[in-house]
Structures are given as C-alpha cells and as structure tokens.
Image (cartoon, grey):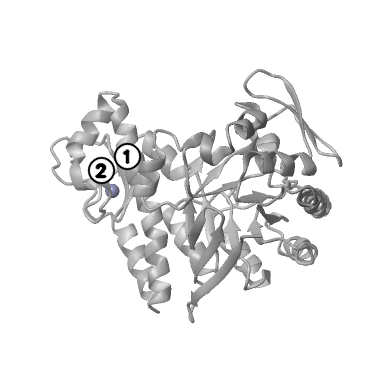
C-alpha cells in the first residue's frame, strides 16, 4: 500500500515535529493544515487557488457527499479527486460528527446511527462498515474510523460507554477495510480516533485499545467543542505522549492560528477547520497581527494589503480599502479574495513552523508568532 510517514526532524525542547506523509496523490508535508471542502469544494476557491496557496491536502465531508450527489455518482465520475478536479491528497471524515451533531433526530445504537437528511428529511443509516465503504467509494486517500462522540459536558458513564463503543466500531471499520482489500479495493489509509472527552483516564483507556489495532495514523477526537484552550491543550499533550512516535497525529476541528501552533508544539501533525474560511467569507481574516475585521470603517482609505507580511495573491495585489469596499457592497469577489488569503495564511503558518523545526529554531519561532499575533500591530481598534 502506497502510504508512508517519515519524520524529518523533531524539536528538542517541545513536541513539534516535521514530517512527510506519502499518498497515491503526492506527499503531504506535516504539520499540515487541511482546508475543508465540505461538499466537494472549499467554498469560493478552485483547486488552482488551493494549489497556489501551497495546499497539498484537503478534507471532504462524507456526510454531505453521501447525501448529495451520493457516493455512486462520485464513484461513477471517477472518484472525488477527478470529480472536483483536485490532484493532491484528500482526507475524508467518517460522517459520524455530522450525523451526531447536526441531526436532532438521530438514533444511535450498537449497529450504527439512523438519521434524517438535513436536505429533504429522507432516512439514512450509517454504520462503521458503511462509513468505510462510502469513503472507499469516494476514492479518498485517508479515511477516518466511525466513532461515537458525546456532547460535553456528559456524565462519566456516558463518556465511558462512548469510548467502549468507539473501540468496538474502530475494529469493525478495520475489518471492513480488510474485506474490501481482499476484493481489490480499500486502498486508502485508515486513521483511528481517540475519544474520552476531557477525561484523561478515559482517553488513555481508549488509546490502549486503539494502539493494538493496525491503523495508519491516529486522530484526537472530541476536543475543541467548548472545553476551552487550556483543557483542550492538556488533552492534546496527554494523547500525543501516548500515541506512537512513528505514526501521524491528527487533531480534528482546530483552526485558530494560536491553537494550531500550540497543538503543533505538542506533537500534532495534521489539523482541519472551517473557521479560517468561514470567517473570511464573513469578512474577518487572521493576519500576522491578529484578527482583522475587513468592514471596519477605519480601513476605508487604507492602502495596505490585508496582511503586509503575507505574499498571497490577494495581499500582493489588493488594498484593505478595496476589500472593505467589496464586502460593504456585497460583491462576491470579496469572499473569494478573503478566502484565498485565509487558506494561504494557515498553510504558510504550518509551513513556517515546519521549517523552524527542521532548522532547530522552533521555540523562538513560536514565541515570536504568539507575541506578534497578540500585538494587534497594523490593525484598527476592534469596535467600529
Ligand atoms: Zn494574504
């Protein structure tokens, strides 16, 4: 199978790592930030925009794609890569997060989850096996195990039961991939997902089981759901200490620049989040000096780019004044140009962190980044 993970360097003072994950659609440099291509598109951006931003992997949502256009259509069109015109790597989630968080009317039992589509109310079923078959049909490079998550805060026995079920479902997913491989399919890598919420003992118990299964990588699940940065990072540190050094580690749903850098410092290799691009479409972007609200009246005649330190195509060419004008006028180009910057900014952040690890200067890079991000340098006051 054409998957490999190599560590090129590890920071001596922190847990930060620089690596490379090989897939049939090219290498993924780690740490990696994955923009979210929910329904086969990172909203408003083309594959060329993503490539120009330095992106070598994106995330697709199984839940959205299975409902529309459906896995059979994607398979018939040659798989998700060809369908959306993306030549680089794709990671798909298992659909579990959406069926359990977006749907009020879901029923979870040992077999799987029954749910209704948010599009038309039609009934669907997702099981650990079906989640693997769908991801295989999409032609993903990295599939995720179907896990049971609980809304936090939750009683201890509920968290514990979700951990036990996650372990049972993890094994069923691996068995299904083995079955597909016997038939010539199932070529994708498969990551297990650690659960247990913010209970360190439960997370340890979950991972003790998952570690015995032949996953190609491990994800940190059930975090950044409202527990707060301090506790979230404690769990990240805890999981990364337990996870094997030689396999990639993926922290799900984290996309604030400070969280991303702090997770990298604790040994995380991959992250995804809709936050940077969703914010961008609403007119807020992260820049070196913090968070910039594009509509702010103070930028009406500002000749500077969004981020004077950024070399994305938006920052090379357009002023804050123009971007603000586009947002105030409701012009679609505003969303697109802000999204170009947002993806470039996150990918550049992890690339710079990677270079700092390789060049043995990560701690200094981290301090300088955090200091500058908190400085709000070049930004107008938030209130406007
Ligand atoms: Zn930029």
Instruction: Look at 44% across and 34% down and name the residue there.
Output: 43
Ligand 1: does it lie within 8 Å of the C-beta at label 2?
yes
Say above or below: 77 vs 203. above
Task: Point out residue 162 in the picture as x, y percentages from the top left corner.
Answer: 79, 49
Quick check: can you spot residue 380? Answer: no
Dividing the picture into quadrants, the one containing residue 232 is bottom right
Q: Which mark is residue 320?
A: none
| Label 1, label 2: how far apart the Cα atoms are | 7 Å
Mark 2 burial class by Cα count in 10 Å: few <14, some 14-19, many 20+: many
Mark 2 lies on residue: 314
Say above or below: 372 vs 60. below
The quadrant in which the C terminus is found is: top left
Instruction: Look at 47% across and 42% down and name the residue there.
Output: 86
Q: Which mark is residue 338?
A: 1
Q: Secondary structure at mark 1?
A: helix
Instruction: Look at 60% across and 65% down and name the residue there.
Output: 4
Ligand 1: does it lie within 8 Å of the C-beta at label 1?
no
Residue that sits furthest to the top in the current view? 120
Dividing the picture into quadrants, the one containing residue 49 is top left
Quick check: can you spot residue 80? Answer: yes
Task: Point out residue 377 in the picture as x, y percentages from the top left corner.
Answer: 24, 56
């Amino acid at each position: 199978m054409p998957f490999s993970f190599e560590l090129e360097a590890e920071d001596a003072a922190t847990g930060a790592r620089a690596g490379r994950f090989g897939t049939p659609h090219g290498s993924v440099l780690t740490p990696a930030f994955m923009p979210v291509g929910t329904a086969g598109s990172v909203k408003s951006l083309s594959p060329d925009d993503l490539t120009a931003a330095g992106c070598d992997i994106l995330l697709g949502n199984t839940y959205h794609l299975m409902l529309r256009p459906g896995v059979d259509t994607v398979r018939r069109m040659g798989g998700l890569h060809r369908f959306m015109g993306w030549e680089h790597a794709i990671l798909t989630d298992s659909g579990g997060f959406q069926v359990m968080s977006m749907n009020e009317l879901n029923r979870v039992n040992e077999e799987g989850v029954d749910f209704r589509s948010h599009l038309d109310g039609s009934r669907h079923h997702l099981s650990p096996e079906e989640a693997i078959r769908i991801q295989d049909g999409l032609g993903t490079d990295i599939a995720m195990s179907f896990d049971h998550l609980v809304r936090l805060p939750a009683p201890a026995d509920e968290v514990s039961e979700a951990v036990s079920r996650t372990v049972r479902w993890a094994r069923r997913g691996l068995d299904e991939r083995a079955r597909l491989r016997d038939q010539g399919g199932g070529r994708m890598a498969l990551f297990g997902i650690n659960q247990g919420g913010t209970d360190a003992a439960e997370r340890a118990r979950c991972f003790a089981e998952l570690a015995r299964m032949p996953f190609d990588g491990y994800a940190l699940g059930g975090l950044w759901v409202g527990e707060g940065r301090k506790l979230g990072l404690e769990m990240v540190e805890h999981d990364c200490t337990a996870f094997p050094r030689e396999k990639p580690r993926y922290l799900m749903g984290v996309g604030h620049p400070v969280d991303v850098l702090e997770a990298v410092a604790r040994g995380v290799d991959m992250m995804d989040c809709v936050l940077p691009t969703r914010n961008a479409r609403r007119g807020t972007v992260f820049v070196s000096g913090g968070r910039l609200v594009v509509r702010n009246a103070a930028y009406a005649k500002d000749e500077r780019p969004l981020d004077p330190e950024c070399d994305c195509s938006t920052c090379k060419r357009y002023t804050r004044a123009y971007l603000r004008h586009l947002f105030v006028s409701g012009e679609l180009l505003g969303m697109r140009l802000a999204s170009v910057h947002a993806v470039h900014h996150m990918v550049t952040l992890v690339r710079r962190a990677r270079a700092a690890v390789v060049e043995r200067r990560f701690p200094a890079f981290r301090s300088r980044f955090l200091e500058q991000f908190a400085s709000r340098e070049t930004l107008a006051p938030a209130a406007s």
